Amino acid sequence: MSSRQRTTVFAAAVLALSMASSVLLLHHIDEIRPREIVDDTLYIASPKLVERASLGFNGLTACIYWTRAVQYFGHRHFLRERSYNELAPLLEITTSLDPQLLPAYQFGANFLAPAPPNGAGQPERAIRLIQYGIQHNPDNWRMYYDLGFIYYTELKDYKKAAEVFAQGSKVPNAHPFLKILAAVMAEHAEDFNTARLLWSAAYQSSGETNIRQNALEHLRAIQVDEDVTNLQNAVTGFVQQNGRIPTSLWEIAAAQHLRGIPVDPDGVPYELSLDGQVLVANPDDFPFITKGTPPGYKPGAPKFHTKLPAS
Amino acid sequence: MSARIIHIASNTFREAVRDRVLYNLIAFAVLLSGAAIFVGQISIEIERLVVINLGLTAVSLFGVVIAIFIGIGLVSKEIEKRTLYTVLSRPVRRWEFIVGKFFGLAGTLVVNTFFMGIGVFGALLYVAHKFSGSDARILIALYFIVLQFLIICALALLFSSFSSPLLSAIFAFSLFIIGSFADDLRGFAGLTHGMARWIATGAAYLVPNFSALNVISAVAHEQAIGSQLILQNTLYALVYAAMALSGAVLIFERRNLK
């Protein structure tokens, strides 16, 4: 082997070795470095300053900030974190850079509004975000739909939700179901059927997989909530009639002349606790349920399903 | 256009190609195809927007860097290598040399932009699987970017006609940044009073207005670009480039090359 060849082989070996070592070292550094600090740092918080620094290339910068917001939320949501301090500023910078970036409003509000761990628990910031979106995209009926949704699901302000749906129905080319939603909201806001109608509309009107999946999970949760409510009423009636708690849901099924114990959307029978509470067997499979969970229950990592529940 | 200008322009183009300027197309292709493949996986619903925004921004920035770094060396390199004396000893006027150099560099950038434009449309087809009518507006954005290059080429030549390459690069790049804030500058001028207002307004109109030539966001959102804007921007870029080029010719004509 000539001297030149030896040098080439040696340099190539050093190159490969140092590259592998640097990757390994960086991996170790990432493990020992506190993740929170990296995640929760927003170097430039002022939308105006970011806009100036982007040298007029606002569109690309907005896309980068939107991707940061998605990654920030996704990472924290996966870890079931309860604080999302930088989410609202990230979304505000994104929409200020590109006020026409519709996914940032639509998804951003869905990230911000729900209570932790499903979202940041900041419905007021979500409302502000959507209102900013309406200001800049007044002809987009979906903005009104999303805003009404937050009033309905998070704030339980049914009157305001009805008003927003009604406003949205007046936008040119608005989807006809906005009018129906406005009417239903005014009359039967707290019914399970109204919630079902709303989430079915969300499922059917969107072609986006994430929105459809979210709607699907809510529809499954509504089914569970309704089942648990009905079963719990039956248990209460049984207690009043017989002066004792039923030993199992078989007794309820027999008293109600049912063919068997009612099952959740996954086909798993509901359960009855010793103190007469109707419970879901696998609450982790229904991230949005408000009933049927044991006392002190903490939800696990989110799961996603692909089939609509039979209602 | 005289044959001499065409010769100088074609030689400038050939020199740029020989200097491997078009290699930037490889970096562009890697950047765009990478974005087209990965953005869909790490973000939500912005694949098309990213391809257009990133593609057109890269076309613009790559072109600006090429225009500045080639433009500033066009005159000084010829003086340094002493090839300028050979050229000027022939029946070639100094202004023809400057204008030829300008067209050569502009031609290089147009070819570069053409190939990058094909890349943008290719990446768009990859993420959207089909073209829509509004995608034709990307051509308008590319056209505006080319207009922007014409101004920067002329400015780089202007600075190169009297200054060192390093200073020319600093001047040209600073003017590009200031020009990106042209609308803000005008806004600031409006806030001042008296003499300061006149000076600030004058300065705001003197720097090139690159923000008017940036329609990338509008095109990404499928917004229409008015024909009046196309016409006015074309006239503005041609007039501004002519102004800077005239300045370069005036200085170069009087420059002592001994």
Image (spheres, rainbow, N blue to C red):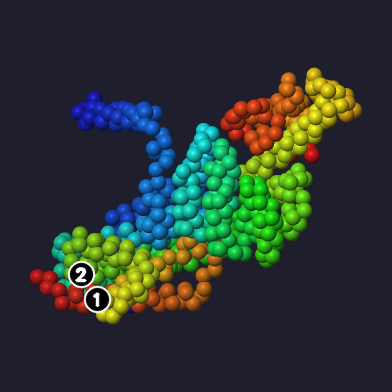
Closer-to-camera residue (A112/A189): A189
The disc label shown at residue B161, or none: 2
Give how far across and how far down residue A32 sits, in percent. Answer: 37, 28
Of the 4 image quadrants, the one containing the N terminus of chain A is top left
Mark 1 lies on a secondary structure that is: helix
Residue B57 horizontal side relative to residue A119, left or right: left
Q: Which residue is drawn at 24% across and 64% down?
A: B171
Closer-to-camera residue (A160/A200): A160
Q: Quadrant of residue A11?
A: top left
Identify the residue position indicated by label 1 in the image.
Answer: B247
Give the residue furthest to the right.
A257
Of the 4 image quadrants, the one containing the C terminus of chain A is top right
Q: Quadrant of residue A119?
A: top right
Q: In which quarter of the image is residue A160?
A: bottom right
Q: Is residue A113 visible?
A: yes
Give how far across and how far down residue A67 sits, in percent. Answer: 48, 47
- In this rendering, the answer to whether B45 lies above or below B230 is above
The amino acid pointed to by label 1 is: Gly
Mark 2, Cα crowd under 10 Å, few <14 / some 14-19 / many 20+, is: many
Could you confirm whether marks 1 and 2 are on the same chain?
A: yes
Q: Is the Cβ of the residue at disc 1 closer than 8 Å to that at disc 2?
A: yes
Q: Residue at x 62, y 28 (%)?
A: A297
Q: Is residue B10 visible?
A: no
